[in-house]
């Protein structure tokens, strides 16, 4: 594992000197916009996503996630964000404020699922039983821990999540469409994320069945999302390489 980490970090240093391959695979997502403004940009190398850059109200990314691969699977990430604790509201857009980076490495089981995640601030260990998983999370900087319970559907989507401390009233449920998610697999921290599941998450519900939030999609002829309408009024447009 240490050897893979070293290879990944050396690759990131090399990528800083060499521009990422501008060739985007045919049909691949490369941008997400809202009202004509860039919200997310995907960069590719060797036919795979190498970086995801997130934007807010300006042309400077406030978040960058870089992906490292082994045998075609993501086994490491390097994620950086501009500190949001600053009293100055322009912090996310200020290119002179350095991004704060942290690395995560992923160990996968024979089915390609997370088995162990090691990061700067936490370590997570997965135990599976059928379509259920128990995740033991230890926070390195706080000397604390928690247990998370997750249930998956047959496609690998996260459909239920709760913590041991919250009990039945802390359960959150998620529902999905039947269309492919262009952000599938692009998990940053190695913890369950409905937004990077195989299908597109369309709503979240609490333990009593009340809708917490909802999204509606339109799709292109290939079944990929074209627009996403959120219940807060935000509308996102997806742009694909022809």
Image (cartoon, rainbow, N blue to C red):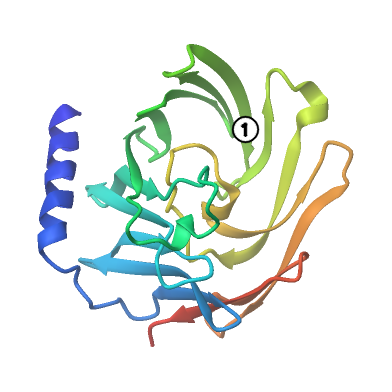
Residue 64, located in which quarter of the rendered image?
bottom left
- Residue found at x 19% / y 35%: 5
Occupied quadrant, residue 176: bottom right
Q: Answer with left or right where residue 229 lies relative to residue 95.
A: right
Residue shown at 38%/88% (left/top)?
A: 242
Q: Position of 135 compared to 169: left or right?
A: left
Closer to us: 233 or 117: 233
Rendered view: 173 above or below 180: above
**Front-most of residues 99 and 4:** 99
34 or 123: nearer the eye? Answer: 34
Judging from the image, what secondary structure is the residue with disc 1 in? Answer: strand
Q: Is residue 47 left or right of residue 217?
A: left
Instruction: Name the residue beneath numbered marker 1.
Output: 150
Q: Is residue 209 above or below residue 66?
A: above
* Rendering coords of residue 102 (x, y %): 33, 38
Q: In the picture shown, does residue 34 fall above or below 96?
A: below
Q: Nearer the viewer, residue 238 or 41?
A: 41
Q: Position of residue 104 (x, y in %)?
A: 34, 36
List the single residue furthest toward the front. 88
Across and down, in percent, residue 67 comes to 30, 51
Quarter of the view holding residue 89: bottom right
């Amino acid at each position: 594992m240490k050897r893979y980490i070293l290879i990944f970090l050396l690759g990131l240093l090399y990528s800083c000197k060499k521009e990422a391959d501008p060739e985007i695979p045919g049909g691949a997502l490369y941008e997400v916009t809202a009202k004509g403004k860039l919200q997310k940009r995907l960069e590719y190398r060797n036919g795979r996503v190498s970086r995801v850059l997130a934007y807010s109200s300006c042309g400077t990314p406030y978040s960058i996630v870089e992906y490292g691969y082994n045998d075609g699977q993501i086994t490491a990430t390097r994620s950086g964000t501009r500190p949001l604790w600053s009293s100055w509201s322009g912090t996310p857009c200020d290119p002179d404020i350095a991004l704060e980076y942290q690395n995560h490495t992923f160990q996968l089981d024979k089915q390609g699922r997370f088995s162990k995640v090691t990061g700067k601030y936490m370590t997570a260990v997965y135990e599976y039983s059928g379509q259920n998983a128990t995740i033991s999370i230890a926070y390195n900087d706080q000397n604390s821990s928690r247990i998370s319970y997750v249930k998956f559907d047959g496609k690998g989507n996260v459909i239920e999540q709760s913590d041991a401390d919250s009990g039945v009233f802390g359960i959150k449920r998620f529902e999905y469409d039947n269309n492919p998610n262009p952000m599938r697999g692009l998990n940053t921290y190695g913890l369950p994320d409905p937004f990077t599941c195989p299908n597109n998450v369309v709503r979240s519900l609490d333990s009593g069945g009340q809708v917490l939030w909802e999204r509606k999609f339109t799709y292109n002829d290939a079944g990929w999302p074209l627009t996403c309408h959120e219940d807060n009024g935000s509308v996102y447009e997806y742009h694909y390489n022809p």
